Image: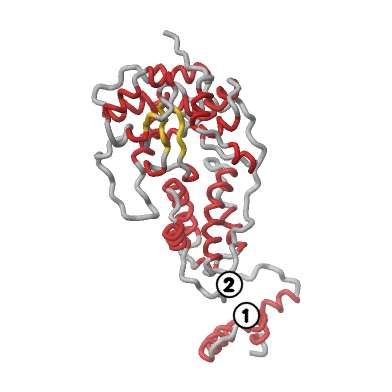
Amino acid sequence: MELGKVASFLGEKGIVLTQDANETLLDIIESELEAAAASLRRRAEGDYAPDPRVTRHPEFRQASQVKQCGLTCWSLFEAWVKERKPGTATVNRWRVVLRALDAFFENRDIAGITADDALAWKNTLVTPERSAGVVNDVWLRAARVNFGWAVANKKIALNPFEKVSVAVGKAAPKVREREFEDDEWATILRATTAPQPARMATHNVAARRWVPWLCAYTGSRPGEVTQLRAEDIQLHKAGFWVMKINPEAGTVKGGQARTVPVHSHVIEQGFLDFVKKVGKGPLFYDPEGSRVERDDPTNPVQAPWVKQRNKLAEWVRKLGVDDPNISANHAWRHTFKRRAARAKIEKRIRFAFCGHSSSDVGDEYETPTVEDMAEELKRFPRFALEA
């Protein structure tokens, strides 16, 4: 005890041993004292060669004194999903993150994960396939939100990911606008009336035929359009047709329903006849189609309107609209808003069509009516296709 300075060592490390553990430690130290003295003698005589005996011993790591909370990174995610019930897209995006986090920390209790541990994980995330922006916006945000939930629910005292981020380098140069060029939107809209494969399901044909036009003239998100039902297309009391984008039909960002008028150009092409033929239910996917059944909130089944949206994006890319600097689907929103702005349609009207909110509180008092929107839509330029 005295020669090995055992009491001093244990005191510095804040370790208290039982009698049995203390005797075990002394048994080990006793066999090492003579070798340690020999090593010190060599040093005193000028021999500083590495001591091979030291490498036999594992690195000292003090056991965590933190009270365990009974949650791993994965079970934390399960608890968060169960209480918060986030959207399917968030769950699918963050599930990969929490799985990776759980593997990195080898199923450790989250109470033992420190800020240094968080930094160590962060340093592994940026790869040639994963940018710093994605790491900050998806990976670190997912960890920060989940651990923040654990703090709020008194599972742990501190969030080790609270201020963790990676440095984002200089943004890539902007090479183009995010709206479709004239030849791009013309390629897509022209393809909507082209013959489709003979064996293609009718709802897939309908999606190709009408979804691009509805996006082009309303600025709606493609996923909001692919979830439309026949009953969402209604005749307004003022005599024009509208489509109701409703969370009851699927999902709407922000959970806010909105009603937008349907452009006369779409109606002239026979859209209402198509809606009448469907009669009731989804317009662009088969409600009776086979579905994967999975009762796991951390791995939700992809909604059929989401699958349809993704199919449309693949189709557009195959048409040759394949510039990676734009989105095959989302570019319709940019196209609509820019064309509307150039047509001198008011900003509040443009925002109402797209479901965008304003940071100006005063704008809430000037929310346009659907009648206002229908009147302004008359000024929106038609997408004219050459014969």
Color scheme of the displayed model: secondary structure
| Camera-side residue of 14 and 35 | 14
Q: Amino acid at mark 2?
A: Arg
**Left or right: 297 in relation to 31:** left
Please tell me whether mark 2 sits on a helix, a strand or a loop.
loop
Please say if the residues under marks 2 and 1 sit with CB atoms less than 8 Å apart.
no
The quadrant holding residue 245 is: top left
The residue pinned by badge 1 equals: 35
Please rate how many residues cluster around mark 2, counting C-alpha atoms within 10 Å: few if below 14, some from 14 to 19, many from 20.
few
Residue found 27% across the figure and 30% down from its top = 278
* Quarter assignment of residue 251: top left
In the picture, which quadrant includes the C terminus?
A: top left
- Earlier-in-chain disc, 2 versus 1: 1
Query: Residue 317, image x and y in percent?
Result: 43, 26
Image coordinates of residue 215 in percent, x first then y, are 45, 28
In the picture shown, does residue 84 fall above or below 61? above
**Viewer-proximal residue, 366 or 65?**
366
Whole-percent x, y for residue 79 in the image: 44, 62
* Amino acid at circle 1: Ala
Left or right, 139 with reference to 252: right
* 353 w.r.t. 88: above or below: above
Q: Secondary structure at mark 1?
A: helix
Q: Looking at the image, which residue sits at the far top?
A: 387
Quadrant that contains the N terminus: bottom right
Which residue is disc 2 drawn over?
61
Measure the alpha-carbon separation of dots 2 and 1: 22 Å
- Residue at left 56%, top 30%? 349
